[in-house]
């Protein structure tokens, strides 16, 4: 039996009359990245907060670092201090100290874990190099780009050499280049045997990094599995997107019979089909329409499971 770094059993949380997390269970093995995805208000951040002992669950059990024989070694919140000593956390928003340099941020943070200054100083060059910030050691966070600050937050989360990382939307607000560099660093951590619990709104990020996905909606677990397996289970393999003048007229045309499923988002019509050839031939006689033929992806899965309606925060 493989060692589980985190086991969550039947977790629930209510705020007044609203149930924000209901009967959620999952686990993370060594070297695994579990992605938690879902619309705004799905319960992702609340679940993370309960795992960190920042919010008390109304029901359920959170166990860390089992011994490989099914016996929980540490339980949250009873063993919160011992658990947090082995965790690394990157929250949605930067919590770097603006008055300290990059190196000083790492030094001060390491002291929270009871590490000696000499031990921390020995780790600082390696952590800054990992974050591609060696040349910024004496620079304060306010002088860094958004991507640099996020990488510094990740380096800071590694100062105690954690066994498990909890990352809450770590690349939100980053440009594509900064996101890709962050992904590269996270993949390196997985290759080194670290385990990661990741919440994200980016489906390409989830598909690239996560070995398994947990889909939450309205506080409930509605799906779980490997990304490609889930896509194959829930979706047709081919997607044809159609947009341009007259695209919406196709919804009630004979072309809809050439697809297993048709959806509309804004001015775009999505045809989901097992074989797109006949549909593409039929669309070729409509020169004013623009088409995109592609394989089904994780974003299609997300929208099928949770809907296309925009969810507001709060």
Image: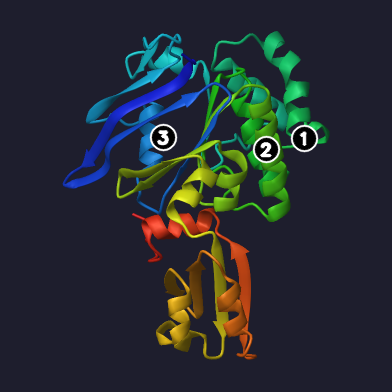
Going by the image, does 107 lie left or right of 10? right
Q: Please give the residue where the numbered disc 2 appears in the rendered image.
A: 151
Residue 240 visible, this angle: yes
Q: Nearer the viewer, residue 45 or 214?
A: 214
Of the image marks 3 and 1, the number of the one nearer the N terminus: 3
Of the image marks 2 and 1, the number of the one nearer the N terminus: 1
Per the image, label 2 sits on a secondary structure element best described as helix
- The answer for how far apart the CA atoms under marks 3 and 1 are is 28 Å
Give x and y (percent) for residue 270. Answer: 50, 72
Residue 70 lies, with reference to residue 232, above or below; the image says: above
In the image, farthest residue toward the right: 135
Going by the image, does 150 lie left or right of 36? right
Going by the image, does 214 lie left or right of 58? right
Q: Please give the residue where the numbered disc 3 appears in the rendered image.
A: 48
Residue 197 lies, with reference to residue 270, above or below; the image says: above
Q: Please give the residue where the numbered disc 1 appears in the rendered image.
A: 133
At label 3, counting other C-alpha atoms closer than 10 Å, the crowd grade (few under 14, some 14-19, many 20 or more) is many
Give x and y (percent) for residue 18. Answer: 21, 47
- The answer for how far apart the CA atoms under marks 2 and 1 are is 8 Å
Going by the image, does 206 lie left or right of 74? right
Per the image, label 3 sits on a secondary structure element best described as helix
The answer to whether marks 2 and 1 mark residues whose Cβ atoms lie closer than 8 Å is yes
At label 1, counting other C-alpha atoms closer than 10 Å, the crowd grade (few under 14, some 14-19, many 20 or more) is many
Give x and y (percent) for residue 158. Answer: 62, 24
Give x and y (percent) for residue 312. Answer: 37, 61
The answer to whether marks 3 and 1 mark residues whose Cβ atoms lie closer than 8 Å is no
């Amino acid at each position: 039996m493989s060692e589980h770094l985190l086991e969550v059993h039947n977790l629930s949380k209510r705020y007044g009359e609203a149930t924000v997390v209901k009967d959620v269970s999952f686990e993370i093995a060594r070297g695994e990245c579990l992605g938690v995805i879902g619309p705004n208000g799905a319960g992702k951040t609340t679940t993370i907060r309960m795992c960190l002992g920042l919010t008390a669950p109304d029901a359920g059990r959170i166990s860390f670092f089992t011994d490989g024989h099914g016996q929980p070694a540490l339980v949250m919140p009873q063993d919160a201090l011992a658990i947090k000593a082995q965790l690394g956390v990157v929250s949605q928003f930067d919590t770097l100290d603006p008055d300290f340099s990059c190196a000083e941020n790492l030094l001060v943070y390491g002291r929270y874990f009871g590490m000696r200054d000499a031990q921390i100083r020995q780790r600082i060059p390696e952590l800054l190099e990992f974050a591609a910030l060696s040349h910024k050691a004496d620079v304060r966070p306010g002088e860094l780009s958004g991507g640099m600050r996020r990488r510094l937050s990740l380096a800071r989360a590694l100062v105690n050499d954690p066994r498990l990382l909890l990352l809450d939307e770590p690349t939100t607000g980053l440009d594509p280049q900064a996101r890709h560099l962050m992904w590269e660093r996270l993949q390196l951590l997985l290759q080194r045997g670290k385990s990661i619990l990741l919440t994200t709104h980016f489906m390409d990020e989830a598909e690239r990094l996560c070995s398994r996905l947990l889909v939450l909606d309205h506080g409930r677990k509605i799906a779980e599995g490997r990304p490609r397996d889930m896509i194959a289970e829930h979706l047709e393999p081919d997607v044809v997107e159609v947009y341009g003048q007259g695209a919406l007229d196709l919804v009630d045309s004979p072309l809809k019979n050439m697809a297993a499923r048709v959806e509309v988002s804004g001015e775009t019509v999505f045809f989901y089909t097992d074989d797109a050839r006949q549909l593409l031939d039929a669309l070729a006689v409509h020169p004013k329409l623009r088409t995109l033929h592609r394989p089904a992806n994780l974003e299609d899965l997300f929208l099928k499971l949770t809907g296309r309606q925009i969810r507001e925060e709060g």
